[in-house]
Image (cartoon, rainbow, N blue to C red):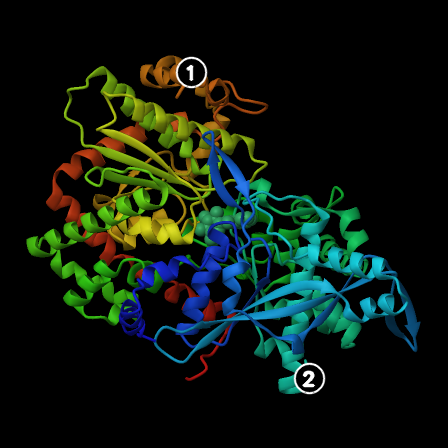
Amino acid sequence: MSLESVFSEALKEYGFDINDIYELESDPGLGNGGLGRLAACYLDSLATLDYPATGFTLRYEYGLFRQKIVDNTQAELPDFWLDSGDVWMMQRSEQIFYINMGGHVRENWNNGKLEIEYIDSTTFEAVPYDIMISGAINEGVALLRLWRATANAKFDMNSFSRGDYDTATRATAAAELITKVLYPTDSHIQGKQLRLSQQYFLVSASLQNIINNHINNFGTLDNFEKKAAIHINDTHPALAIPEMMRLLLDVYGYSWDDAWKKTVASMAYTNHTVLSEALETWDIELVKGLLPRIYMIIEEINRRFTKTLEETGNQSMLPNTSILWHNRVKMANLCIIGCHSINGVSKLHSEIIKDSIFKDFYCLYPKRFTNVTNGIAHRRWLNGANPRLSGFITELIGNNFYVDASNLSKLTNYVGNNGVLDALAKIKQENKNDFASYMQKNSDVIINPNSRFDLQVKRIHEYKRQLLNVLKIIHLYLGICDSPNLNFTPQTFIFGGKTAESYYHAKRIINLINNLSDEIKDDKRTRDKLAVVFLENYNVTLAERIIPAAEISEQISLAGKEASGTSNMKFMLNGALTLGTVDGANVEILEKVGAENMFTFGIRSEDVAVEWSRGYSASSLYSSDKYIKRIIDKLRDGIGGTSFSDIATYLTVGIGGVADPYMCLRDFKDYLRAHNYADQTYKDARKWNDMSLINIAKAGFFSADRSIEEYAKSIWNLEKYHK
Ligand code: OAK
């Protein structure tokens, strides 16, 4: 509403700083990482671009845990975000829906029509809470609807009236468990019944809601697929497909063929990962037990699909494409069979899914596959998070980039302009100073604002290779110890990120980073040149503070593993230079800025499988490369007083699997080369600032507005409210 300065002034008169007020509101930690954050960015664009849209999610009482670093390792504390977060939510008790789970079903044929009777099932109530997402420049509003689970009030009343308070309260507690807490596993499935209940609860409430609205508007579902588009954000809401079928068949009386046409025509699916451990599969018995009717429908979908495969002579595709396989329900297969559109989230990723994990499906349905490269809410990540930079850009090119980020390209007119480059450098320095003061004030961490800020902030995961970054820092550290008088640009390596409580290896990496931080701090030879900082409880609030201060953005996943990445886009938009592999959306960043404005390194995705098949041997790298050997030996000897021999073994011999599964040692040498090149470039401030300017200028493509326009046009066939 452009009223921030008015409020800021008014608050000042009462002795308050508006920033302190902002701090009081906690982040709604309703997701784990990139997947949920992307959805939040998309809601901003949907509202601003005037598209009619609702995002559905669960109103978890406890969001993603609060991370505390205790004895240099991660501890998890509950995140009760609702104490300050629910001021924005409106309960809409008039739109409650009912969801059945458990028990069994009886099929009754009545005059040739099938009627489904639910026996001994439990009915839950889904209560909606709405958060309005206002458009930035218009009157558009998108809705975020969060469902809270509770016991069926009618059922409760019966128990109460019988005086059976125990049953009544037990039922409420069991129901409320469904939306109690967000599962903290990212890119890894946990096959728990409660998680499956959450998924079904979300899709059933949301679909009943969508269908109900449609009936209210049109009085029929005959035109449903022409008026509604349902998007499945990874496979977590995949049960929307059989649930849609259930509603059309059992409640609205459509034939199978008509119901199926409607379902496929209205549903679209985005895949957000190729990691096999993240591809959801559910135990058949679990699905049957919790969702008997849904399971029957899945079986029928699969029976018809399998029959077509056989009729077309494609039986050999069965192992990869069947929904039911080896006692598991494969959710991605369900999505591909049940959706008219399937997309990856960067050009490279969309090619990889066609060539590898969904290859057979691509042969069967080539027209369904497409790409939509991710984007970020540039108004949040530039205008909101970095007012200095956005103010300066406005002085240079006007404020049209706020509405249309492609206008940022006008900044290329200032390449080589010393006045502009100096101003950019000054802004970066001020943002660094601010961040250093913030850290000192809020967590007693001292950061030298005159060192180079090098960041890797994201979930901690083997494939993202925080370990590779650590190996490099150990190398630099040992180098300074060898030659303390060598000219060395002071550098601060900043890490941040959470990992699931159960992910042992990632927790060890957090431990290693914190120990390394201590050892370097305690060493007189290195402490003024090198620093490692682990930001506790990395979240959106912290990201908004640190990204504007970043100079190097580490995007160093093993090629082929990061579907897209979105922090890479946020960093570039704020003028950081990318040190990265040719992976995910880095590929498109490279395309936009050119190789001369990015520091790339590492194996290419198409070569990874080739190297494995040739017998990639990490242990021979250990024996042949004296730098690698020294670093691994140092891990064994100890960092910060603790031996990390388990990590040394993981890299060289393997722990219950192959050695160095994400090829850290394979890419180490080339990573060092790219780092050294970045280091040399940094010494030439003019060149560095020019590169930084070009990165900002080319970031417009990565606005979520562009992604949403692509979804609206090519997948949803969606029109704006006001044409
Ligand atoms: C998490 C769990 C299961 C499946 C995917 C994820 C996930 O977070 N994927 C991430 O999605 C982001 C948004 O598309 C991408 O930028 C990340 O590369 C991807 O890891």
* Amino acid of disc 1: Ser
Q: Which mark is residue 211?
A: none
Which residue lies under the disc numbered 2? 220
| Residue 25 as seen in the image, left or right of residue 325 | left
Q: Nearer the viewer, residue 500 or 118?
A: 500
Is residue 320 visible from the viewing direction of this image?
A: yes
Q: Residue at 38% x, 34% y: name it.
A: 603
The image shows residue 434, relative to residue 468, as above or below, that is: below
Residue 254: x and y in percent read: 76, 76
Residue neighbourhood size for the residue with mark 1, other residues' Cα within 10 Å, grouped as few (<14), some (14–19), many (≥20): few
Q: Quadrant of the C terminus?
A: bottom left
Looking at the image, the residue that sits furthest to the front is 14
Q: Nearer the viewer, residue 452 or 622?
A: 452
Looking at the rendered structure, the secondary structure element under dot 2 is loop
Numbered disc in front, either 1 or 2: 2
Q: Are marks 1 and 2 in contact (CB under 8 Å)?
A: no
The image shows residue 149, relative to residue 361, as above or below, that is: below
* Amino acid of disc 2: Thr
Residue 472: x and y in percent read: 33, 27
Residue neighbourhood size for the residue with mark 2, other residues' Cα within 10 Å, grouped as few (<14), some (14–19), many (≥20): few
Which residue lies under the disc numbered 1? 620
Looking at the rendered structure, the secondary structure element under dot 1 is helix
Which image quadrant is residue 108 in?
Answer: bottom right
The image shows residue 92, relative to residue 38, as above or below, that is: below
Q: What distance separates the C-alpha of mark 1 from that of mark 2? A: 68 Å
The image shows residue 571, relative to residue 106, as above or below, that is: above
Looking at the image, the residue that sits furthest to the left is 418
Q: Residue at 30% x, 74% y: name it.
A: 2
Q: Residue at 25% x, 17% y: name it.
A: 481
Q: Quadrant of the N terminus?
A: bottom left
Residue 664: x and y in percent read: 41, 28
